[in-house]
Every structure is written in structure tokens, then in C-alpha cells.
Amino acid sequence: MKRLLAAAVLAMAAAPAVADDTPFRGSEEDRYYMITFVSGVEYWFPVYEMMKQAGQQLGVDTVYTGTPEYDVTKQLAVFEQVLAQNPKGILIAPMNPEPFIEPINRAAEMGIPVVTFGADSPNSKRTAYVTSDNIREGIIAADAIAEAMGGSGEYAVLENPGQDNHDRRIAAFIGRMDEKWPGMRLVGRAASNQDPTKAYNAVLSMAQANPNLGAVFMPEASSALGAAQAAQELGTGIKIMLTDVNGKILDMIKAGEVFGSLNPNQGVQGYLGMLMLYLAANRALIDPMNDTAMTGENPFGGILIDNGLTVVTAENADYFRWDAYLARRGTQGIKE
């Protein structure tokens, strides 16, 4: 059903504008914001690129913003600043779910739809959540590592406790190992919090305590930079597996320094996120057979969309180069 919904939404957005009053043509005065944390991380850029394209096709304005720090308090402050601008809608990857419940609910009461992507605040009144299947990511990563190690060996994980999507990936990874690969033994867990230096030190420490450590999985790319460096220095063949990519990670994958990565289809994530915001902000576009007219709820509310994922290897790594992608599209990325 999720895939059918996504296909329907894409089809509606792709319909040619035949008149200025077409329902899928907004106003240039309508502004939609995308809010991130650690805003310089390359992962966000393709998300915004496709949010921006959807906005252009719909005739509305889009803005990229966030905080450069891994700090939930600062991301909350950015959210409040954006909310004060009375935007038409907000696309956000909340760093932690609980702190955003009240601000997102307040936005909903103001009539400003909020769509989460990548990471969620499930107990809030967010309109929709667009993400890859975090559980499936953890399962795929576990199977890949276990198969490469012959179903037997020691592994560890690096994590970012409290970030919803990362917690799900780690839990699914460990759960899959326990369920399907009894010969794989978890020997270490460390909180790297997307810090390459913390990841580097953690891998060195875990390898010292466990000389037979064969693999380390982490739910994001920044930690992998430090983890891969440590693995190379140790020279024991530790396999580094992660989710997300950036230019350096792609180089490491091609050089054989990183075992592999699972990358969500960020462009689809941003495009569908923008479409869901537009639909939620223009709720009168449909007249569904439900009780939303009575309850006052948004008919586009409570929707979950899977944007898919790709396994990145040495063979396809070059398709994920951000600079080449921008050059091909002829845009300035997040600067626009």
C-alpha cells in the first residue's frame, strides 16, 4: 500500500500543468523549510536537491537550514526560528524523537504541517514519515557480514543512542545476528555519536580487548571514517559496514578499505517529503471517504512511506558522487 501511495503521489506531481489554477501549482510566496542537524553532512544534500526540484515543479519556494552541531537543543532552536516565519510546511529529520513532540504538535495546531524523514518523532502530530526501512537495513547488513565471515566470528557495533532511526538499525542488526547467525558473537558496543575520533578510538579499544574482532557495523557514515582508519592501522582484516555514504566513504569502498554501505534513496526521500507537505498544506485537494471532515484531522496525516535503499559497492560507487551529481544537474545544491 505504501508503494502504491508513493506511485500515486508521484503520478499526480508529474501531471503537466494545463492552467495557472491547476491544484498542483502553488504560489512562489509559499515557503517550505528543510531542517537538519550536523547540516554539513553530505547525506542531507541529495534530500534537499530533490525537495527543491519538487518545489520548483509545484511553483513554491524551498529553504535548506539546520544546525552544524550534533546538538538537539540547537536543532530545537532552529525549529522555533523557522516556526516564527510561519512557513507553509516543514520537512525535518529530528535528532531525537521526544524533544520534538511538543514543537511539532504546536506547529500542527498553527496549521503548519510537519513531515519527518530519515528519523522520526512517532508520538507527535507529524503529518507523515518518509524513510527507508531501518529494520531491513540492519538485517541486510547483518546477513552480508555474517555470510562474508562464514557464519562464525566476533563483531561489534558503534551507535548513537537516542536517534530513532539509528537505534532501529542497530537493534535489527543485532537481532538478526542472534536469530539467524548463532555463530556470530557480539563482543563490543560503543557510542561514537557520529564522531570519527570517538569511532577510531573505540575500534582500537575493542580490537585490543578482542583480538579476533572480525567486523564492526555502524548506522551512519561519519563514524565509519574513524572506524575504517583504525581497521587499516590494525591490519587484521576487520570488515567495516555502515549506512549512508559520502565522498570519502566512496573512495574507501572502491579501495577495499570499507566492506560496504547501505544508502537510503535520499532523492526519493526529499521529493516525496515535499509532495506530502504540499498535499497536507492543501488538504482540500481531496474529499476522502472518512471522518476527517468531522474530526478536523488532516486527510493526509499518519502516512508512512518507504523511499527504498541501495547497497553501495565498488561497482556502483561512482553513481553516488555528490559533485558529479550536481554537475550533471547544473545546480548549486543546498546554496539554492
Image (cartoon, rainbow, N blue to C red):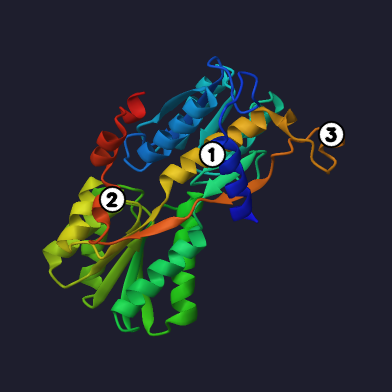
Quarter of the C terminus within the rendering: top left
Q: Amino acid at mark 2?
A: Tyr
Q: Is residue 70 left or right of residue 33?
A: left
Q: Which mark is residue 168?
A: none
Q: Quadrant of residue 285?
A: top right
Residue 172 vs residue 52, the one in the foreground = 52
Q: Which residue is mark 3?
A: 293
Q: Is residue 86 above or below residue 128?
A: above
Please provide percent x and percent y for residue 103: 61, 31
Label 3 SS: helix
**Residue depth check, mark 1 versus mark 2: number of the one nearer the observer:** 2
Residue at 49% of width from left, 52% of height from top? 165
- Give the crowd class for mark 1: few <14, some 14-19, many >=20 residues within 10 Å: many
Q: Amino acid at mark 1?
A: Gly
Q: Which residue is mark 1?
A: 273
Circles 3, 2 touching at the beta carbon (< 8 Å): no
Q: Which residue is mark 2?
A: 319
Q: Amino acid at mark 3?
A: Ala
Q: CA distance from mark 1 to mark 2?
A: 22 Å
- Give the crowd class for mark 2: few <14, some 14-19, many >=20 residues within 10 Å: few
Label 2 SS: helix
Upstream in the sequence, badge 1 or badge 3?
A: 1
Q: Is residue 109 left or right of residue 239?
A: right
Residue 63 vs residue 282, the one in the foreground = 282
Please provide percent x and percent y for residue 91: 52, 34
Please provide percent x and percent y for residue 148: 29, 77
Quarter of the N terminus within the rendering: bottom right
Q: Residue furthest top?
A: 29
Q: CA distance from mark 3 to mark 2?
A: 46 Å
Q: Is residue 7 above or below residue 90?
A: below
